[in-house]
């Protein structure tokens, strides 16, 4: 009877460990596609890229002519009272005059930059900023692949832990029930009951912690995709682990020096900072502008009072046309030291960009080495843990046999069971790390693409 109850407990433990592979629904590629549609970081990066590209057109517009036209209508009414002294009659005469004027005016204004060095430099800087925005967007796309993969495998690892702790808790619960039954018939002391109860309470606490870690892992993925997932595809039980091609860390470092996106972005930022020095120094240069104005106006005046003399017209029209062209040369003489201060500021920012570029370079080297060594370590760990799993399984079977003949206790069996599942959990984590380090290595080398994520997805159960 004791053996049958134990076998039931152990079966529950192993069944729970396999439950993650049953009815898996969502794979890594599907999760990534949802992240592309819903991740705020990648969507914001797309808008940043579009906005920065628009600034190139804005800078170029400063080199093109501007043309504007205005058309206006006006109406003016005049009333006047005049007095005149008639010496013949010695009387004061009053004259009332009233007129109305209608006018219309068309103004056409043209301006064109002939020479402005700052405008040309501003265009060059805008193009470089658009180029950097494109690189930054590629950085975010690669980062999304890594973030999705990390969140995905963190969920699988957390689910492994929940399955293990739940199965262990159920097995210890059965042990506790057996212990209580034995105590009631006087076969064991109360201290054995307390020990079993303490182990069960600890198992419950461990299960609560594991479930909380799983909830946090699920929430981390939802932050990216705006979706919750009940089931994710687990890893295949067996797949080949290989060193990256080429299997030479120095070649990967050379690749990172050429293609690491963060490093390339920092080089562009340094070029922008250098051009900004020239831009601000160009504040000392003169500028030459062409402007032209064409004005066409017509004014029509109608006399209402007094009546016109015979032969005179009541209405008088006065047309007018005027054209003006001018070249304006502006020479900066003194601006309170503002221009030179901007030059010094730009020089300091250039040095800042140089240091940031060096920081990016060192980070690229570190990340490449770390990922490459991580792959090597993961492969070695998987091999060792596979052997550990076999050994711990054999030890469990031997302990189980001893329990059945009375030479080992249920505590020994549960400890052996825990060792088996700990080895299985560590083995799965080592495989997750192998996949993640493979993706990180390509990210550090600047070659990570969606195809790499598809290949990683092929290691999952469909």
Image (cartoon, helix red, strand yellow):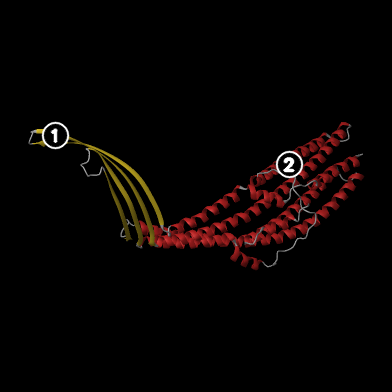
How many numbered marks, from 0 up? 2
Which of the two residues, 116 or 358, is positioned nearer the viewer here? 116
* Disc number lying in front (2 or 1): 1
Q: Quadrant of the N terminus?
A: top right
Q: Alpha carbon of mark 2 to alpha carbon of mark 1: how far?
A: 116 Å
Which of the two residues, 195 or 444, is positioned nearer the viewer here? 444
Which of the 4 image quadrants contains residue 199? top right
Above-or-below relation of 237 to 249: above
Question: Is residue 115 shown to the viewer in this render?
Answer: no
Image spot of residue 221 (x, y percent): 67, 46
Image spot of residue 352 (x, y percent): 48, 59
Q: Is residue 337 left or right of residue 263?
A: left
Question: Is residue 23 shown to the viewer in this render?
Answer: yes
- Numbered disc 2: secondary structure: helix
- In this view, the residue farthest toward the front is 310
Image spot of residue 260 (x, y percent): 60, 62
- Residue 187: image tag: none
- Residue that carries the numbered disc 1 in the rendered image: 93
- In this view, the residue farthest toward the top is 184
The residue depicted at 56 percent of the width and 51 percent of the height is 47
Which of the two residues, 262 or 371, is positioned nearer the viewer here? 262
- Residue that carries the numbered disc 2 in the rendered image: 206
The residue depicted at 71 percent of the width and 55 percent of the height is 433
Which of the two residues, 346 or 209, is positioned nearer the viewer here? 346
> Mark 2 vs mark 1: which is more N-terminal?
1
Image spot of residue 351 (x, y percent): 46, 61
For label 1, the crowd category at 10 Å Cα-Cα, with few meaning under 14, some 14 to 19 and many 20 or more, is few
Which of the 4 image quadrants contains residue 290? bottom left
Q: Is residue 62 left or right of residue 196?
A: left
């Amino acid at each position: 009877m004791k053996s049958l109850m134990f076998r039931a407990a152990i079966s529950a433990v192993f069944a729970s460990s396999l439950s993650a592979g049953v009815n898996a629904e969502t794979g890594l590629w599907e999760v990534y596609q949802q992240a592309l549609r819903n991740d705020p970081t990648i969507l914001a990066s797309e808008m940043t890229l579009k906005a920065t590209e628009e600034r190139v057109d804005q800078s170029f517009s400063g080199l093109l002519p501007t043309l504007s036209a205005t058309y206006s209508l006006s109406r003016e009414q005049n009333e006047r009272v005049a007095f005149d002294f008639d010496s013949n009659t010695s009387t004061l005469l009053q004259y009332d005059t009233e007129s109305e004027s209608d006018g219309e005016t068309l103004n056409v204004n043209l301006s064109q930059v002939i020479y402005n060095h700052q405008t040309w430099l501003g265009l060059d800087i805008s193009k470089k900023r658009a180029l950097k925005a494109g690189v930054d967007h590629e950085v975010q796309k690669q980062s999304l692949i890594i973030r999705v993969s990390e969140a995905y495998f963190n969920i699988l690892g957390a689910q492994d832990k929940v399955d293990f702790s739940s199965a262990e808790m159920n097995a210890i619960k059965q042990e506790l029930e057996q212990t209580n039954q034995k105590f009631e018939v006087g076969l064991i002391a109360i201290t054995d009951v307390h020990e079993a109860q303490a182990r069960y309470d600890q198992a419950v606490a461990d299960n609560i912690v594991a479930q909380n870690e799983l909830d946090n892992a699920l929430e981390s993925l939802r932050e990216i995709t705006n979706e919750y997932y009940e089931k994710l595809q687990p890893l295949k039980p067996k797949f080949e682990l290989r060193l990256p091609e080429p299997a030479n860390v120095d070649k990967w470092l050379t690749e990172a020096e050429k293609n690491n996106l963060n490093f390339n972005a920092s080089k562009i930022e340094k070029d922008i900072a250098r051009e900004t020095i020239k831009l601000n120094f160009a504040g000392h240069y003169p500028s030459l502008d062409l402007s032209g104005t064409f004005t066409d106006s017509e004014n029509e005046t109608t006399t209402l009072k007094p009546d016109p003399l015979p032969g005179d017209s009541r209405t008088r029209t006065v047309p007018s046309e005027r054209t003006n062209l001018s070249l304006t040369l502006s020479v900066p003489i003194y601006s309170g030291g503002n221009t030179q201060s901007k030059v010094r500021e730009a020089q300091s920012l250039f040095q800042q960009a140089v240091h940031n570029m060096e920081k990016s370079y060192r980070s690229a080297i570190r990340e490449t080495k770390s990922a490459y060594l991580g792959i090597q370590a993961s492969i070695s760990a998987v091999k060792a843990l596979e052997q550990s799993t076999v050994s711990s399984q054999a030890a469990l079977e031997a302990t189980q046999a001893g329990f059945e003949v009375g030479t080992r206790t249920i505590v020994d069996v549960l400890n052996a069971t825990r060792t088996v599942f700990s080895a299985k959990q560590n083995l799965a984590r080592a495989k997750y790390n192998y996949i993640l380090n493979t993706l990180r290595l390509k990210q550090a080398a600047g070659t990570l693409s969606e195809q790499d994520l598809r290949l990683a997805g092929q290691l999952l159960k469909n």
